[in-house]
Amino acid sequence: MKKILINACFLFSALFAAAQTPVQWMPYVQQNGVYFSSNHVTSTGAGIGLGLAVGVGNHFLAQSDINIYWINGNAVSTRLAAGYKRNGTWAPAILGNVSLLWGGRTEVLLEDGQRPVSPVAVLGLRLAGLRFENDKGFVSALELGFGFGPYQGTCPEVSFLCVGIRL
């Protein structure tokens, strides 16, 4: 997993070095919830997160964030997402993402008596239909996501409100 993150960092830095398009850095805060359910692991909660969105040109958007959830223990997720956004005031986006769920969860032991793998990796897709941005930042409401993980797991998630400022 570390190799993938390092390669992604090199890819993004090379992209910025070669690009002649403007790059916008936008730190953000969000209020969200997640429910991962599988045959052996359940992790759920609602909480808050901090992240950084990077816009390259008019349409490419990359996001990275960390979130903490409270309900079923103290769960934490880290997410890396990239995708397409519309240019303009109304800027809906579609993002592919990889999330890692850490921390508090409910487990059912595997058939051989071992504990399920931790952290749980989830591959998914996010839709931000109510996303608006201007020269000062962006606001997004009701971002919906759905992902798949190990042990036949599904992971619906929602970001109720996300607010970012442009640096």
Image (cartoon, rainbow, N blue to C red):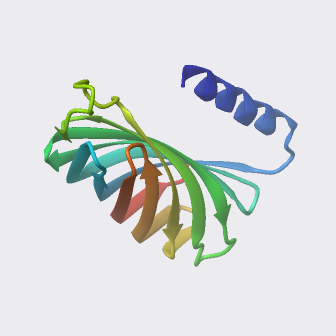
Count of number-bearing discs: 0
In the image, residue 154 sits, relative to residue 66, either above or below, namely below
The residue depicted at 52 percent of the width and 73 percent of the height is 132
The N terminus, quarter of image = top right
Q: Can residue 64 be seen?
A: no
Q: Position of residue 4 (x, y in %)?
A: 62, 28
**158 lies left or right of 108:** right
**78 lies left or right of 75:** right
Q: Nearer the viewer, residue 102 or 15?
A: 102
Kindly indicate the quadrant of the structure image that contains residue 93.
bottom right
Q: Nearer the viewer, residue 152 or 57?
A: 152
Q: Position of residue 47 (x, y in %)?
A: 22, 51
**101 lies left or right of 121:** left
In the image, residue 127 sits, relative to residue 23, either above or below, namely below
The residue depicted at 62 percent of the width and 21 percent of the height is 3
The residue depicted at 60 percent of the width and 76 percent of the height is 89
Q: Can residue 67 be seen?
A: yes
